Amino acid sequence: MFCANSSLAQNIIPNGNLEDTIQKNFGLKFAKEWDSPTNGSPDYLTNFHIVDFGAPDNFAGFQEAKSGIAYLGIITFFSNGLAREYIQNKLIRSLQKDSSYCFQMYVSLADSMNYATKNSLGVYFSETAINSTTRVNLPFTPYLEVDSTFNIDKTNWVKVGGSFVANGNEEYLIIGNFNDNSNTDTSFVDGGGNDPMFQAAYYYIDNVFLGHCDSLPVDTSIGLRENSLKDKLNVYPNPFEGRVVVNYEGNQSLNFILYNLLGKEVIVSPTGTINNRYALDLGDLPKGIYFLSVSDGVNRVTKKLIKQ
Protein backbone atom coordinates (compact mmCIF):
# COMPACT_ATOMS: atom_id res chain seq x y z
CA MET A 1 0.00 0.00 0.00
CA PHE A 2 2.84 2.43 0.78
CA CYS A 3 4.39 1.86 -2.66
CA ALA A 4 1.08 2.41 -4.45
CA ASN A 5 0.28 5.58 -2.56
CA SER A 6 3.82 6.86 -3.03
CA SER A 7 3.57 6.35 -6.79
CA LEU A 8 0.21 8.08 -7.03
CA ALA A 9 1.46 10.98 -4.87
CA GLN A 10 4.03 11.84 -7.56
CA ASN A 11 1.28 12.83 -9.98
CA ILE A 12 1.45 16.64 -10.27
CA ILE A 13 -2.09 16.78 -11.70
CA PRO A 14 -4.50 17.29 -8.77
CA ASN A 15 -7.49 14.94 -8.90
CA GLY A 16 -5.97 13.03 -11.79
CA ASN A 17 -8.31 10.10 -11.12
CA LEU A 18 -11.32 12.49 -11.45
CA GLU A 19 -13.07 11.16 -8.34
CA ASP A 20 -13.21 14.37 -6.23
CA THR A 21 -16.20 16.52 -7.16
CA ILE A 22 -17.59 20.05 -6.91
CA GLN A 23 -21.23 21.07 -7.20
CA LYS A 24 -22.31 22.77 -10.43
CA ASN A 25 -25.63 24.11 -11.74
CA PHE A 26 -28.84 22.09 -12.08
CA GLY A 27 -27.75 19.54 -9.49
CA LEU A 28 -24.84 18.31 -11.61
CA LYS A 29 -21.31 17.72 -10.35
CA PHE A 30 -17.95 18.21 -12.04
CA ALA A 31 -14.43 17.01 -11.37
CA LYS A 32 -12.73 19.19 -8.75
CA GLU A 33 -9.64 21.07 -10.05
CA TRP A 34 -10.84 20.66 -13.66
CA ASP A 35 -12.69 23.14 -15.85
CA SER A 36 -13.25 24.12 -19.48
CA PRO A 37 -10.89 26.73 -20.98
CA THR A 38 -13.49 27.57 -23.67
CA ASN A 39 -17.26 27.85 -24.10
CA GLY A 40 -17.32 24.18 -24.96
CA SER A 41 -18.99 21.85 -22.46
CA PRO A 42 -16.98 18.75 -21.53
CA ASP A 43 -19.04 16.18 -19.65
CA TYR A 44 -18.46 14.72 -16.19
CA LEU A 45 -19.90 11.21 -16.23
CA THR A 46 -20.46 9.54 -12.86
CA ASN A 47 -22.96 7.38 -11.03
CA PHE A 48 -23.89 10.48 -8.99
CA HIS A 49 -25.74 11.51 -12.16
CA ILE A 50 -28.61 9.67 -13.80
CA VAL A 51 -29.83 9.31 -17.39
CA ASP A 52 -27.69 11.39 -19.82
CA PHE A 53 -24.64 12.01 -17.61
CA GLY A 54 -24.49 8.79 -15.64
CA ALA A 55 -21.83 6.13 -15.50
CA PRO A 56 -21.47 3.51 -16.69
CA ASP A 57 -24.61 4.27 -18.79
CA ASN A 58 -24.89 7.72 -20.44
CA PHE A 59 -26.09 9.53 -23.57
CA ALA A 60 -23.03 8.48 -25.59
CA GLY A 61 -22.90 4.80 -24.65
CA PHE A 62 -21.80 2.48 -21.88
CA GLN A 63 -18.41 2.35 -20.17
CA GLU A 64 -17.29 1.40 -16.69
CA ALA A 65 -14.78 3.86 -15.22
CA LYS A 66 -11.15 2.79 -15.54
CA SER A 67 -11.08 3.10 -11.76
CA GLY A 68 -13.55 4.52 -9.28
CA ILE A 69 -16.94 5.75 -10.51
CA ALA A 70 -16.25 8.75 -12.78
CA TYR A 71 -14.61 9.95 -15.97
CA LEU A 72 -14.75 12.88 -18.42
CA GLY A 73 -15.94 13.07 -22.03
CA ILE A 74 -14.88 15.50 -24.78
CA ILE A 75 -15.60 16.04 -28.50
CA THR A 76 -12.48 15.85 -30.68
CA PHE A 77 -14.31 16.06 -34.01
CA PHE A 78 -17.80 16.99 -35.24
CA SER A 79 -18.58 16.39 -38.92
CA ASN A 80 -21.18 19.17 -39.14
CA GLY A 81 -18.99 21.93 -37.73
CA LEU A 82 -15.85 22.82 -35.82
CA ALA A 83 -17.15 22.04 -32.34
CA ARG A 84 -14.38 21.27 -29.86
CA GLU A 85 -14.26 20.53 -26.14
CA TYR A 86 -11.25 20.82 -23.84
CA ILE A 87 -10.43 20.15 -20.21
CA GLN A 88 -8.01 22.26 -18.14
CA ASN A 89 -6.21 21.68 -14.85
CA LYS A 90 -3.85 23.81 -12.74
CA LEU A 91 -0.81 21.71 -11.84
CA ILE A 92 0.33 21.22 -8.26
CA ARG A 93 3.60 22.94 -9.18
CA SER A 94 4.98 24.61 -12.29
CA LEU A 95 7.18 22.67 -14.70
CA GLN A 96 10.94 23.04 -14.49
CA LYS A 97 12.89 24.36 -17.46
CA ASP A 98 14.61 21.66 -19.58
CA SER A 99 13.19 18.87 -17.40
CA SER A 100 11.69 15.78 -19.03
CA TYR A 101 8.12 14.80 -18.11
CA CYS A 102 5.91 11.86 -18.98
CA PHE A 103 2.18 12.16 -19.57
CA GLN A 104 -0.33 9.32 -19.48
CA MET A 105 -4.10 8.87 -19.56
CA TYR A 106 -6.71 6.28 -20.52
CA VAL A 107 -9.23 6.87 -23.32
CA SER A 108 -12.16 4.99 -24.87
CA LEU A 109 -14.31 5.89 -27.87
CA ALA A 110 -18.01 6.22 -26.94
CA ASP A 111 -20.35 3.56 -28.37
CA SER A 112 -22.65 5.90 -30.30
CA MET A 113 -19.92 7.69 -32.23
CA ASN A 114 -19.49 7.24 -35.98
CA TYR A 115 -15.94 8.61 -36.18
CA ALA A 116 -12.56 8.02 -34.60
CA THR A 117 -9.67 10.46 -34.79
CA LYS A 118 -5.88 10.21 -35.00
CA ASN A 119 -3.30 12.77 -33.84
CA SER A 120 -6.12 14.80 -32.33
CA LEU A 121 -5.74 14.23 -28.60
CA GLY A 122 -3.20 16.92 -27.85
CA VAL A 123 -1.74 18.13 -24.56
CA TYR A 124 -0.80 21.79 -24.24
CA PHE A 125 0.83 23.55 -21.28
CA SER A 126 0.46 27.24 -20.46
CA GLU A 127 1.94 29.62 -17.91
CA THR A 128 -1.50 31.18 -17.38
CA ALA A 129 -5.05 29.83 -17.40
CA ILE A 130 -6.80 29.80 -20.78
CA ASN A 131 -10.18 31.54 -20.73
CA SER A 132 -11.65 31.75 -24.22
CA THR A 133 -15.20 32.29 -25.48
CA THR A 134 -14.61 30.11 -28.55
CA ARG A 135 -16.41 26.84 -29.22
CA VAL A 136 -13.98 25.81 -31.97
CA ASN A 137 -10.36 24.72 -31.87
CA LEU A 138 -7.88 26.66 -29.76
CA PRO A 139 -5.01 28.05 -31.89
CA PHE A 140 -2.17 26.43 -29.95
CA THR A 141 0.45 23.88 -30.88
CA PRO A 142 0.29 21.02 -28.37
CA TYR A 143 3.43 19.84 -26.62
CA LEU A 144 2.53 16.28 -27.61
CA GLU A 145 -0.21 14.33 -29.40
CA VAL A 146 -0.91 11.01 -27.73
CA ASP A 147 -2.99 9.12 -30.34
CA SER A 148 -0.71 8.15 -33.20
CA THR A 149 -3.26 5.59 -34.48
CA PHE A 150 -7.05 5.66 -34.88
CA ASN A 151 -8.48 4.73 -31.48
CA ILE A 152 -11.64 2.81 -32.41
CA ASP A 153 -11.89 0.75 -29.21
CA LYS A 154 -15.38 1.16 -27.76
CA THR A 155 -14.99 -1.63 -25.21
CA ASN A 156 -11.65 -1.19 -23.45
CA TRP A 157 -9.69 1.67 -21.94
CA VAL A 158 -6.60 2.34 -24.03
CA LYS A 159 -3.48 3.76 -22.36
CA VAL A 160 -1.94 6.65 -24.32
CA GLY A 161 0.82 9.09 -23.52
CA GLY A 162 4.22 10.46 -24.32
CA SER A 163 7.15 12.50 -23.04
CA PHE A 164 8.34 16.08 -23.58
CA VAL A 165 10.83 18.64 -22.31
CA ALA A 166 9.32 21.63 -20.49
CA ASN A 167 10.08 25.22 -21.46
CA GLY A 168 9.73 26.12 -17.79
CA ASN A 169 7.08 27.85 -15.61
CA GLU A 170 4.09 26.12 -17.23
CA GLU A 171 1.31 25.81 -14.63
CA TYR A 172 -1.77 24.74 -16.62
CA LEU A 173 -2.54 21.64 -18.67
CA ILE A 174 -5.14 21.60 -21.48
CA ILE A 175 -6.29 18.42 -23.25
CA GLY A 176 -8.20 18.35 -26.56
CA ASN A 177 -7.95 18.59 -30.35
CA PHE A 178 -6.14 21.76 -31.40
CA ASN A 179 -6.61 21.08 -35.14
CA ASP A 180 -9.44 22.37 -37.32
CA ASN A 181 -11.51 19.86 -39.30
CA SER A 182 -9.37 20.11 -42.42
CA ASN A 183 -6.31 19.05 -40.41
CA THR A 184 -8.05 16.38 -38.32
CA ASP A 185 -7.48 12.81 -39.50
CA THR A 186 -10.73 10.83 -39.14
CA SER A 187 -11.95 7.31 -39.77
CA PHE A 188 -15.56 6.13 -40.05
CA VAL A 189 -16.51 3.56 -37.41
CA ASP A 190 -19.38 1.09 -37.82
CA GLY A 191 -22.06 0.71 -35.19
CA GLY A 192 -22.66 4.34 -34.26
CA GLY A 193 -25.99 6.02 -33.61
CA ASN A 194 -28.25 7.67 -36.20
CA ASP A 195 -28.72 10.99 -34.43
CA PRO A 196 -26.79 13.88 -36.07
CA MET A 197 -25.04 14.53 -32.74
CA PHE A 198 -23.29 11.17 -33.14
CA GLN A 199 -21.61 12.15 -36.42
CA ALA A 200 -18.62 12.94 -34.27
CA ALA A 201 -15.68 11.56 -32.31
CA TYR A 202 -16.26 11.71 -28.56
CA TYR A 203 -13.75 10.16 -26.18
CA TYR A 204 -14.03 9.19 -22.55
CA ILE A 205 -10.96 10.12 -20.45
CA ASP A 206 -9.86 8.72 -17.08
CA ASN A 207 -6.78 8.47 -14.82
CA VAL A 208 -4.68 11.38 -16.08
CA PHE A 209 -1.04 11.40 -14.94
CA LEU A 210 1.87 13.82 -15.30
CA GLY A 211 5.24 13.47 -13.59
CA HIS A 212 8.88 12.64 -14.00
CA CYS A 213 9.26 9.58 -16.16
CA ASP A 214 10.85 7.46 -13.42
CA SER A 215 7.57 7.73 -11.46
CA LEU A 216 5.22 6.79 -14.33
CA PRO A 217 2.69 4.27 -12.98
CA VAL A 218 2.19 0.98 -14.79
CA ASP A 219 -1.52 1.21 -14.03
CA THR A 220 -3.03 4.22 -12.28
CA SER A 221 -5.74 2.07 -10.73
CA ILE A 222 -3.14 0.42 -8.46
CA GLY A 223 -4.23 0.44 -4.84
CA LEU A 224 -7.96 0.63 -5.57
CA ARG A 225 -10.17 -2.21 -4.40
CA GLU A 226 -11.49 -4.25 -7.30
CA ASN A 227 -14.93 -5.81 -7.46
CA SER A 228 -14.41 -9.42 -6.30
CA LEU A 229 -17.05 -10.71 -8.73
CA LYS A 230 -15.31 -9.07 -11.69
CA ASP A 231 -12.12 -11.01 -10.99
CA LYS A 232 -14.00 -14.33 -11.00
CA LEU A 233 -15.81 -13.92 -14.33
CA ASN A 234 -14.71 -14.81 -17.84
CA VAL A 235 -17.23 -14.15 -20.63
CA TYR A 236 -16.42 -15.53 -24.11
CA PRO A 237 -16.39 -15.42 -27.08
CA ASN A 238 -16.68 -11.67 -27.58
CA PRO A 239 -17.60 -10.71 -30.27
CA PHE A 240 -20.03 -13.63 -30.55
CA GLU A 241 -22.36 -15.12 -33.15
CA GLY A 242 -24.52 -17.56 -31.19
CA ARG A 243 -23.72 -18.93 -27.75
CA VAL A 244 -21.93 -17.00 -25.01
CA VAL A 245 -20.25 -18.82 -22.12
CA VAL A 246 -19.88 -17.31 -18.64
CA ASN A 247 -17.21 -19.09 -16.63
CA TYR A 248 -17.46 -18.30 -12.90
CA GLU A 249 -14.80 -19.16 -10.31
CA GLY A 250 -17.10 -18.93 -7.31
CA ASN A 251 -19.81 -20.77 -5.39
CA GLN A 252 -22.77 -18.37 -5.51
CA SER A 253 -25.57 -18.68 -8.06
CA LEU A 254 -25.53 -15.99 -10.71
CA ASN A 255 -28.39 -13.94 -12.15
CA PHE A 256 -28.27 -12.44 -15.64
CA ILE A 257 -29.98 -9.46 -17.28
CA LEU A 258 -29.23 -8.50 -20.90
CA TYR A 259 -29.83 -4.99 -22.27
CA ASN A 260 -29.65 -3.67 -25.81
CA LEU A 261 -27.94 -0.38 -26.74
CA LEU A 262 -31.15 1.56 -25.95
CA GLY A 263 -31.24 0.17 -22.41
CA LYS A 264 -34.21 -2.14 -23.09
CA GLU A 265 -34.12 -5.48 -21.30
CA VAL A 266 -33.76 -8.57 -23.47
CA ILE A 267 -35.03 -11.84 -22.04
CA VAL A 268 -32.19 -14.30 -21.49
CA SER A 269 -31.67 -17.38 -19.34
CA PRO A 270 -28.90 -19.98 -19.16
CA THR A 271 -29.48 -22.99 -21.41
CA GLY A 272 -27.25 -25.12 -19.22
CA THR A 273 -24.96 -24.94 -16.19
CA ILE A 274 -22.03 -27.25 -15.50
CA ASN A 275 -19.62 -26.55 -12.64
CA ASN A 276 -20.52 -22.83 -12.58
CA ARG A 277 -20.07 -22.53 -16.33
CA TYR A 278 -23.19 -20.92 -17.79
CA ALA A 279 -24.16 -21.15 -21.46
CA LEU A 280 -26.36 -18.37 -22.90
CA ASP A 281 -28.00 -18.93 -26.29
CA LEU A 282 -28.07 -15.49 -27.96
CA GLY A 283 -28.07 -16.61 -31.58
CA ASP A 284 -31.51 -15.09 -32.34
CA LEU A 285 -30.47 -11.56 -31.40
CA PRO A 286 -29.92 -8.93 -34.11
CA LYS A 287 -26.36 -7.80 -34.71
CA GLY A 288 -25.23 -4.98 -32.44
CA ILE A 289 -23.96 -4.04 -28.98
CA TYR A 290 -25.45 -5.54 -25.80
CA PHE A 291 -24.72 -5.26 -22.08
CA LEU A 292 -24.83 -8.36 -19.87
CA SER A 293 -25.43 -7.59 -16.20
CA VAL A 294 -24.23 -10.37 -13.90
CA SER A 295 -25.05 -10.46 -10.17
CA ASP A 296 -24.08 -12.85 -7.38
CA GLY A 297 -26.57 -11.25 -4.97
CA VAL A 298 -23.98 -8.84 -3.53
CA ASN A 299 -21.86 -7.51 -6.37
CA ARG A 300 -22.88 -6.66 -9.90
CA VAL A 301 -20.72 -6.55 -13.03
CA THR A 302 -21.73 -5.42 -16.51
CA LYS A 303 -19.97 -6.80 -19.59
CA LYS A 304 -20.23 -5.24 -23.03
CA LEU A 305 -20.95 -7.84 -25.74
CA ILE A 306 -20.88 -7.45 -29.52
CA LYS A 307 -23.12 -9.66 -31.72
CA GLN A 308 -21.60 -10.19 -35.17
Image (cartoon, helix red, strand yellow):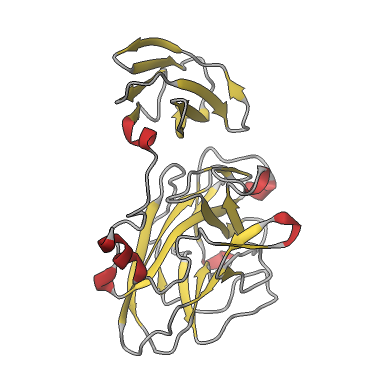
Q: Residue furthest top?
A: 272
Q: Nearer the viewer, residue 155 or 16?
A: 16
Residue 272 horizontal side relative to residue 4, left or right: right
Residue 276 coordinates in the image, percent (x, y): 32, 17
Taking 263 as reference, is 283 above or below it?
Answer: above
Do we see residue 192 in this rendering? yes
Q: Residue furthest right?
A: 26
Taking 35 as reference, is 225 above or below it?
Answer: above
Write the residue at 58% across / 52% down: 45
Q: Which quadrant: the C terminus? A: top left
Q: Nearer the viewer, residue 42 or 231?
A: 231
Residue 177 coordinates in the image, percent (x, y): 53, 67
Residue 120 coordinates in the image, percent (x, y): 48, 64
Tally of numbered tags: 0
Q: Which quadrant: the N terminus? A: bottom left
Write the residue at 43% across / 46% down: 153
Residue 218 coordinates in the image, percent (x, y): 28, 58
